Amino acid sequence: MINNTLIGKTMEEMETLMVSMNLPKFKAAQLYKWIYNNQVPDIMSMTNLSKPLRDILSRNYELHALKLLKISGSKSSAARKFLFQMTDGSKVESVLMRSGKRVTICISSQVGCALDCKFCATGEMGFKKNLSVGEIVDQVIQLQSYSKERITNVVYMGMGEPFLNYKRVITSAFLLNDKNGFGLGAGRITISTSGIVPAIQQFAEEKQPFKLAISLNASSQSQRISIMPIAKTHSLNSLMKTVSYYIKNTGRKPTFEYVLLDSINDEPADGKRLISLIGKLPCKLNVIPYNEIDGLYKCPPESRIKIFLESLKPAPFMVTVRRSKCT
Ligand code: SF4
């Protein structure tokens, strides 16, 4: 029975595979290039591999880890959603967004999520499983084959908390970044966390080259706990200390994400507190008016969004507003 996929294997794993078949190691480099660099649709298209090798690979491996079930959103719209099924039947979503010359995709790292952020549909599902490296990378490969334009940015901001699947997320980011792999610059790969402090610490200590985004969404500990229960385990205070360490150790600027929720965190006083909280750090702030689901929370009306943004005018950091379909 086929129970293994090629997408997601690292160069070392492909070398081990070749050696196990009594083949020279350089065949692994050819296979790797076909998969990540050329993104061929099937094993038989890997024309510089011998026919017998392609036959063996086809008999024993699948190329893809995911089956595309559905694409939603009109072709003319800026965002399209892709629903994939994994071999165990579970489903996961990715989003492709176009804005000017940017083609950004938002990918998932888990099925469901344990963190139960109160404004999030995925949080309501609870945690189901961690995605494999192949299931993460295949979202990018399949969205690239769909998109006529080259994907310019990848954000780990779909289903799940990426830092609770740390090892596989980092391995997948390296496959996307490798110039012999997918070849996307590290500065174009963003990992967004809701604030898993020990993992941010590890990310900083390892001086990972990828961009870090922190889903902050609140300007005080009590406010954060009310919408993000993870703040009980990793307090706002410890989060800010660890982010400061990240900046000091890597010299990189993190981005704070702030999902704007009507009458929850959108008062001018919230803006003022936000400036005191992060204003001394080299950072950027993305304000994301809430993308409503059926639930308690609403997106503020434009007039409130405007007043909130006014309150951020004195901020020393750059503020952008992102209308996202990702969260
Ligand atoms: Fe999980 Fe992210 Fe949803 Fe929070 S917002 S529950 S971290 S998927």
Image (cartoon, rainbow, N blue to C red):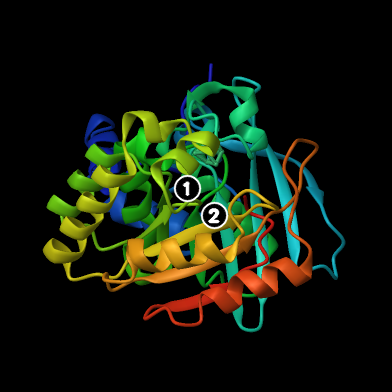
User: Dot 1 corresponds to which residue?
Assistant: 137
The disc label shown at residue 239, or none: none
Q: What amino acid type should be assigned to the residue bearing mark 2?
A: Val
User: Dot 2 corresponds to which residue?
Assistant: 140
Q: Are marks 2 and 1 in contact (CB under 8 Å)?
A: yes
Q: What amino acid type should be assigned to the residue bearing mark 1?
A: Val
Question: Please, what secondary structure does the residue beneath circle 1 have?
Answer: helix
Q: Quadrant of residue 70?
A: top right
Q: Residue at horizontal 44%, vertical 57%?
A: 36
Total numbered labels: 2
Relative to residue 64, is residue 15 drawn left or right?
A: left
| Closest to the observer, 60 or 236 | 236
| Closest to the observer, 74 or 138 | 74
The reply to whether the residue tagged 1 has its Cβ within 8 angstroms of ligand 1 is: no
User: How far apart, in angstroms, are the residues tagged by discs 2 and 1?
Assistant: 5 Å
Q: Residue at horizontal 41%, vertical 60%?
A: 190
Residue 292 on image: x %, y %: 76, 48
